[in-house]
Image (tube, grey):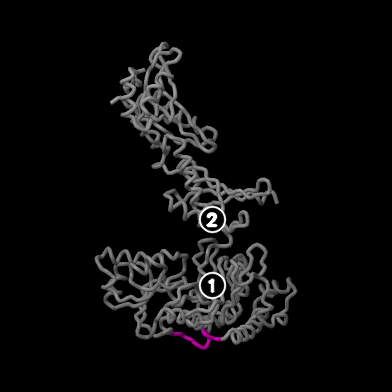
Amino acid sequence: MERYWNEEIECMSREDMKKLQDERLAAQVKHVYENVKYYRDLMDEKGVKPEDIRSTDDLHKLPFLSKADLRDAYPYGLLAKPLSDCVRIQSTSGTTGKRVVAFYTQHDIDLWEDCCARAITAAGGTNEDVCQVCYGYGLFTGGPGLNGGSHKVGCLTLPMSSGNTERQITFMRDLGSTILCCTPSYAAYIGETLHDMGYTTDDIKLKAGIFGAEPWTEEMRRSIEKSLGIKAYDIYGLTETSGPGVSFECSEQTGMHINEDHFIPEIINPETGEVLPEGEVGELVFTSITKEAFPLLRYRTRDLCVLSRKKCSCGRTLIKMSKPMGRSDDMMIIRGVNVFPSQIETVLIEQGYSPNYLIEVDRVNNSDTLDISVEMNPDQLSDKVKDMQQQERALAEAMKTMLGINPKIHLVTPKSITRSEGKAVRVIDRRKLHD
Amino acid sequence: MANVRQISVFVDNKPNRLAGVMKLLKESGINLRALSLADTKDFGILRIIVNDTDKAVRLLKEAAYAVTVTEILAISIPDSPGQLSRVLDILGADGVNLEYLYAFIGKSDRSVSFVIRVDDNIHAADSLTRGGIIQLTENDIAEM
């Protein structure tokens, strides 16, 4: 039997949900316009007044916010409540530049934890469970979010944070943890360590895992499920909107239900900003309609995915998003096909090549060209030219299967592609020079 | 064993790549005995026979070149019309499949040497011996 944390909301009819969203959106836009000068200026620039936003149908009139805006407005520029009303700060890792800080009132913490409680319940969690949280605690939202959700559900909560894996397993065994919350890569590592320590899944009581905060594949899901003897559920969120729990997986495991009573999703064309119909791949945009302190309207996540209102066997009517397929800022459109560097990297690793590569895109006679320079594998060097050309052909074939278009592969000397200390430059798009 | 070790080096089709390999060998006093370069649009495979194979391989690897060593056959035949044709006929008659071959300077100006790359060295070496063709050892070549 499927359990819900808030059945009224999670199984609400589309009409009622839209009504709720309409009311909340109109009130939120007014709140933001009155309290956030940064966004008020953006709205004024576009000639949009709060009165123009009466329902979700008017959402497209609002200006977007991006990560760049968050940096410009750092630290208080997007704050919508006096600091005296705020009780918490969380922050992003800051790996791609300046940190983003998000503010929470007690109400914001409650709604965030409530979203996490929905996720834990959807994974089968009740007050009978022992929930081991090995996301990092601190500024990172993973630990605090799931910790709070676990409290709400009434699970016996183990606030382990990450690291010290043998101790994680000792606690897991001694205290009979039934639910594990962490990143998927850490779950895989816990599974490996469990077996290295000579235990099997019979030695632990885990039944479910809630894993997020990084991209993971279906293959990884199956391997974690096997090594820990559990069902593995995906969870999605970002500090800018609150943290984990913006969306979560149910027993069907075919995408994540978005808590759309708090976050209205849209899918847009990342190039033009145009809103795309349901079922099309594009950039995910969220509008927070209930948060008080840090309510972002039309925030561009840069995650690419698909939305679906297909009926779900779990009974929830909340719209579903697919696993993010990549980042919009990495996406290239070549001959009309979406290509991500991550896909190219996957093929290279599968085929035994170094993941150091250079992608060059150009336009010759009005047709896009894709050239990939790949460091040849020194163990595969042959004195025969035809062997080497065969390697290039085999790699091009594997790329075509993955990407849907035929690239030209160029083998180059090992270690000759420039390494970078920070974010590596992997793509040179010369088409922009011609435009 | 008459087989001779040939070093193959992967070189990008860019200016100075070949020069880099030659400079490295020059500085270490290694002498080239035979050389051929097979190239494609993107890269070349430099094949060389040197007077000190082990040292050359070690130095090239230390300098991060992709290197592989293959055993090839080397022969010496009289420098007169029809000699190479005779060798190919012998190999052909025995069904030896030739991958590539290249000439290099021989012991004297009355003979010429060839590197012969086949898939089955033992079979080919037998065939050459039976046909009365002189095969060179790695030592022979090093002392040229």
- Element class at badge 1: strand
Quadrant in which residue B101 is drawn: top left
Residue type, label 2:
Leu
Give residue A400's position: percent from left, percent from top. 52, 52
Farthest residue to the bottom: give it: A8
Chain under numbered label 1: A
Give residue A165's position: percent from left, percent from top. 32, 67
Residue type, label 1:
Met
The magenta region covers A3-12
Q: In the image, what residue occupies the spot 36% across and 77% down?
A: A179
Does the magenta stretch mainly form a helix, a strand or a loop?
A: loop
Q: Name the residue under label 1.
A: A321
Using a 10 Å C-alpha cutoff, classify the residue at mark 2 as few (fewer than 14 neighbours), some (14 to 19) or many (20 or more): some
Using a 10 Å C-alpha cutoff, classify the residue at mark 1 as few (fewer than 14 neighbours), some (14 to 19) or many (20 or more): many
Q: As rendered, which of A65 and B105 lies closer to the eye?
A: B105
Q: In the image, what residue occupies the spot 67% across and 76% down?
A: A59
Q: In the image, what residue occupies the spot 40% across and 34% down?
A: B60
Mark 2–mark 1 Cα distance, whole angstroms, equals 22 Å
Say which mark, if any, is on residue A403: 2
Farthest residue to the left: give it: A198
The reply to whether the C-beta atoms of the residues labelled 2 and 1 are less than 8 Å apart is no
